[in-house]
């Protein structure tokens, strides 16, 4: 009698171990997939990056925060403007519609985004009013003239050295220039408190980099978007 009972317990134990292994494998695959997706949003590349670009362009919150942040900069028709991490070029288009007799430059570390943004702004690129380059805030290219306005929307969190990046941007700007750093926290469980904390962090970094007249504004999305602005003396 004991033989069948022992055998049954062994089978059940083996079954539980097999199930545990399967669940572990599933979780590992999910984690790898999440990391791969996150990597594409940080630096889109290949066909998957092309799809990510389209998703970002179609997301209404992405459009709203870009256009809103552009409005806060107060771009004038003759301004020279720089955007760090322009993605699909939504803000680039909005900036070029304001700097009608100036120049809008942008850098992005994704070749896929450079191609998509160039297509989106093809007419302005051909006219010489928009200049988009494959580069990053860590390795900024040389520009002919300093900038009146600088914009970064949801990108500073991906800079390897934010303080050094802000200092480099400060050196590229004219006296009286204005910078806008906008951020909508995308971490799991982000709330309005997360946004407030992010804004305080950005304000402290801008001040440490030499920017003055620090102020901020908030866009009521879920979670809210914070835009911190600073000026160059």
Image: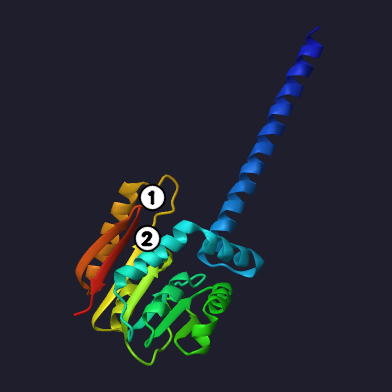
Examine the rendered structure and indicate whether residue 223 appears above or below residue 88: above
Q: CA distance from mark 2 to mark 1?
A: 10 Å
Classify residue 68 as left or right of residue 4: left
Q: Residue at x 34, y 91 (%)?
A: 145
Label 1 SS: loop
Classify residue 142 as left or right of residue 29: left
Q: Residue furthest top?
A: 1
Q: Residue furthest bottom?
A: 144
Looking at the image, tell me whether mark 2 or mark 1 is earlier in sequence order. 2
Marks 2,1: beta carbons within 8 A: no
State which quadrant residue 74 falls in. bottom left
State which quadrant residue 69 falls in. bottom left
Q: Residue at x 29, y 53 (%)?
A: 197
Q: Nearer the viewer, residue 230 or 200?
A: 230
Residue bearing mark 1: 223
Q: Residue at x 72, y 33 (%)?
A: 18
Residue bearing mark 2: 183
Whether residue 93 can be seen here: yes
């Amino acid at each position: 009698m004991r033989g069948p009972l022992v055998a049954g317990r062994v089978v059940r134990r083996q079954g539980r171990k097999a199930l545990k292994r399967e669940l572990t494998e599933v979780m590992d695959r999910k984690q790898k997939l999440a990391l791969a997706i996150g990597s594409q949003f940080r630096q889109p590349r290949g066909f998957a990056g092309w799809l990510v670009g389209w998703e970002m362009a179609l997301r209404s919150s992405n459009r709203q925060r870009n256009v809103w942040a552009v409005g806060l900069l107060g771009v004038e028709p003759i301004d020279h403007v720089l955007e760090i991490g322009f993605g699909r070029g939504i803000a680039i288009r909005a900036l070029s519609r304001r700097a009608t007799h100036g120049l809008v430059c942008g850098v992005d570390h994704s070749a896929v985004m450079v191609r998509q943004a160039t297509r989106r702004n093809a007419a302005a690129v051909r006219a010489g009013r928009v200049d988009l380059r494959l580069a990053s805030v860590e390795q900024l290219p040389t520009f002919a003239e300093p900038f009146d306005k600088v914009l970064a929307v949801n990108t500073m969190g991906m800079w390897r050295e934010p303080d050094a990046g802000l200092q480099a941007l400060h050196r590229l700007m004219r006296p009286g220039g204005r910078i806008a750093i906008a951020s909508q926290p995308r971490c799991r469980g982000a709330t309005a408190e997360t946004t407030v904390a992010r804004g305080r962090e950005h304000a402290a970094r801008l001040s440490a980099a030499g920017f003055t007249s620090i102020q901020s504004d908030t866009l009521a999305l879920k979670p809210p978007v914070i835009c911190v602005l600073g000026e160059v003396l």
